[in-house]
Image: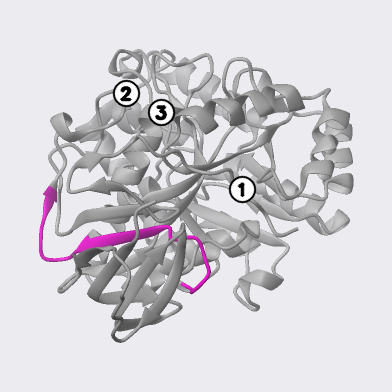
Amino acid sequence: MQNYLIKNIQVVNENKIEAADVWIADERIKKIAPRITLNTHCTEINGEGKYLLPGAIDDQVHFRDPGLTQKATIYTEARAAVAGGVTSFMEMPNTVPPALRQDLLEEKYGIASQSSVANYSFFMGTSNNNADEVLRTNEKKKDICGVKIFMGASTGNLLVDNYLTIDKIFRESEVLIATHCEEESIIKDNYHRLKAEKGDLSPSDHPLVRNEEACFESSFKAVQLAKKHNTRLHILHISTEKELQLFTNLFPLKEKRITAEVCVHHLHFTSNDYATFGYKIKCNPAIKAPYNKEALWAALLDDRLDVIATDHAPHLLSEKEPPYEHAHAGLPLVQHPLLLMLYYHKQGKISLQKIVQKMSHAVADCFQIAERGYIREGYFADLVMVDLNESTTVSKEELFYKCGWSPLEGFTFPASITHTFVNGNLVYENGAVNDSYKGARLVFDR
């Protein structure tokens, strides 16, 4: 295994930025010091003028493997992830077949072990009638990131609206429960009303169909259940100002039983952008009116929102065409979340330390991921080097996604990712992915 010595780099970690040398050996961060001189052979990398960040951990992706591999595979999307500085991901159960049994879940781990250049974990899926199977996850607390519930939100046969099932899982689960919260009855009422009024719907109608009330009502129910049972609840992709009243910053993340995620597209786009991007930015929950975006930013910065993710959800471009009912919901984003946040850093919106906190430290703390998410001696060397003086323009030719498109095409970021290390292995360097190395299954300190 190759050893590396990164010299003269600015290390961004635990709310500090400090110049240091970093020695990587045997998958780990061996030493961090102002100056390191080694007698052993290693590859030296000049980090002068660059920054070293812990690898981003994306707690919500859809890699479509197995069963939907015309859109994406674990192999292709993991390559996109490391090109974007994402060294670990947690993938959702809505594949074909959906991961509703422990053996199907383990099959996904098998695929990842053979094909993923990034580290990985997979959520156990929930349906209206598999509560006992879901609760077998309690026996694997150290090996599985959590349980996913599509709570009142229709996604194939993963819609869970049986109160007895939901209550049993909230009562008995010993692992984190992650929820997609949108109230299906409100969504259906909105759709039928707008359809009767307008006939054909347009992209800009999406946030009217899946409106603020649909999100709030479902999130409120999840929070009430979690409080009732003292459940470890993590609500995904918060998209509305109204939902923010459900979360607190009055105590540290490690003490929270209820946490929340915000996604990069809800921090970047607003409903005004449907005129430009159309169904390319159709997603669930919907991108909404601009005041929601500003409220999300405020809550991210004051720690009511705990982590940043992508909800990477690739579809073929042919699946993003009208009519409204045909256009699939989801955006491919895992190659650019860090660059997007660095763009907002350059805009003066967020500090480098806060980016690292929300994309690495907090995700590791939230899910209790062992020995990752920080730049610490002895931790796994999941690291990203960035250059804030070299720009990156998103082009179709440089995308690693199997679907071959991005809503960010043509956008120029005032930064670039130069190197990505996964478990001490240099898997991405200046536009090229070394996929001969395979990532590791995440382990959780529970």
Q: How is the image coloured?
A: one colour
Residue 207 % position (x, y)? 43, 36
Image quarter (top left, top right, bottom left or bottom right) of the C terminus: bottom right
Residue 188's image quarter? top right
Could you say which is closer to the camera, residue 330 or residue 109? 109
Q: Where does label 3 land, which residue?
A: 75
User: Main SS of the magenta segment?
Assistant: loop
Sequence-earlier tag: 1 or 2: 1
Dot 1 alpha-carbon crowd within 10 angstroms: few under 14, some 14 to 19, many 20 or more: many
Which numbered dot is residue 125?
Answer: none
Is residue 237 shown left or right of residue 312?
right
Q: Where does label 1 land, which residue?
A: 216
Determine the residue located farthest toward the bottom in the rendered image.
34
Circles 1 and 2 in contact, beta carbons < 8 Å: no
Type of amino acid at the residue the image marks with label 1? Phe
Is residue 266 shown left or right of residue 10?
right
Separation of disc 3 and disc 1 at Cα? Answer: 36 Å
Q: Where does label 2 land, which residue?
A: 402
Separation of disc 1 and disc 2 at Cα? Answer: 34 Å
Could you say which is closer to the camera, residue 200 or residue 287? 287
Type of amino acid at the residue the image marks with label 3? Tyr
**Residue appearing at x 28%, y 80% in the figure:** 37
**Residue appearing at x 32%, y 69% in the figure:** 40
User: Please, what secondary structure does the residue beneath circle 2 have?
Assistant: loop
Q: Nearer the viewer, mark 3 or mark 2?
A: 3
Magenta region: which residues? Answer: 376-392
